[in-house]
Image (cartoon, rainbow, N blue to C red):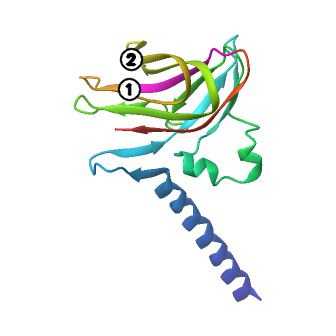
């Protein structure tokens, strides 16, 4: 009986460890340029009063978003109401650390076309390195910071109706 419990415990532990390792490998994928890596992101949504409303992780691509189970496809989460801010970061580990020779590109998809503001925000200087303001159903913006720095992504819903961020990634 003890041998059976040990075997079951070993198998469960092995499955959990393998699953965790597999998730970390899937979280980054090589792009067409072997020196660039695409990173999946975490998010935080702040309401118009600056209160943290929601946190989570986003799929890394449109294909990954489409492969999510039905409840995720219906987007009960990741939805921005007018004026709300979504901050994209390293899934709970803070800003992306970018060196002076890198180009960083923030890409994301929305569930519909909407009026939005998006930017790559330099946290040490509290300024935007690159911004975009207008009507979009998704976007890709990039910048070379020219110095070592830390950045996060910002998305603000400027539309009167809610919108959902379906996926996001950072490449650098």
In the image, 124 versus 155, the foreground residue is 155
Q: CA distance from mark 1 to mark 2?
A: 7 Å
Whether residue 46 is visible to the viewer of this picture, yes or no, is yes
Which numbered dot is residue 150? Answer: 1
Q: Residues within 10 Å of mark 2 (few under 14, many from 20)?
A: few
The residue tagged 2 is 124
Is 152 in the magenta?
Answer: yes
- Residues packed near mark 1 inside 10 Å, few (<14), some (14 to 19) or many (20 plus): some
Q: Quadrant of the N terminus?
A: bottom right
Q: Position of residue 122 (x, y in %)?
A: 40, 19
78 on left or right of 93: right
Tag 2 secondary structure: loop
As for residue 96 lying within the magenta part, the answer is no
**Residue 5 spot, x, y in % from top left:** 73, 81
In the image, taking residue 80 as reference, residue 23 lies left or right, namely left
User: Is 43 situated left or right of 78 in this image?
Assistant: left
Q: Main secondary structure of the magenta part?
A: strand
Residue 99, x across and y down, in percent: 27, 31
Q: Are dots 1 and 2 in contact, CB under 8 Å?
A: yes
Residue 85, given in percent of the width and then of the height, sits at: 61, 19
Res. 20 image quadrant = bottom right
Question: Which of the 4 quarters of the picture holds residue 150?
Answer: top left
Look at the image and give the residue range highlighted in magenta. Answer: 151-159
Q: Residue shown at 31%/45% (left/top)?
A: 36
Q: Residue at x 69, y 88 (%)?
A: 3
């Amino acid at each position: 009986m003890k041998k059976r419990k040990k075997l079951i415990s070993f198998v469960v532990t092995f499955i959990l460890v393998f699953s965790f390792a597999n998730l970390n490998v899937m979280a980054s994928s090589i792009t067409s340029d072997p020196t660039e890596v695409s990173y999946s992101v975490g998010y935080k949504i702040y309401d118009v009063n600056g209160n943290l409303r929601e946190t989570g992780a986003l799929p890394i691509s449109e294909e990954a978003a489409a492969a999510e189970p039905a409840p995720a496809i219906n987007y009960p989460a990741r939805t921005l109401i007018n004026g709300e801010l979504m901050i994209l970061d390293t899934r709970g580990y803070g800003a992306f650390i970018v060196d002076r020779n890198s180009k960083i590109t923030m890409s994301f998809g929305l569930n519909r076309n909407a009026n939005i503001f998006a930017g790559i925000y330099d946290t040490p200087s509290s300024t935007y390195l690159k911004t975009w303001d207008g009507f979009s159903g998704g976007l890709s913006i990039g910048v070379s910071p020219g110095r070592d720095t830390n950045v996060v992504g910002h998305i603000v819903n400027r539309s009167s109706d809610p919108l959902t961020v379906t996926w996001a990634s950072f490449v650098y």
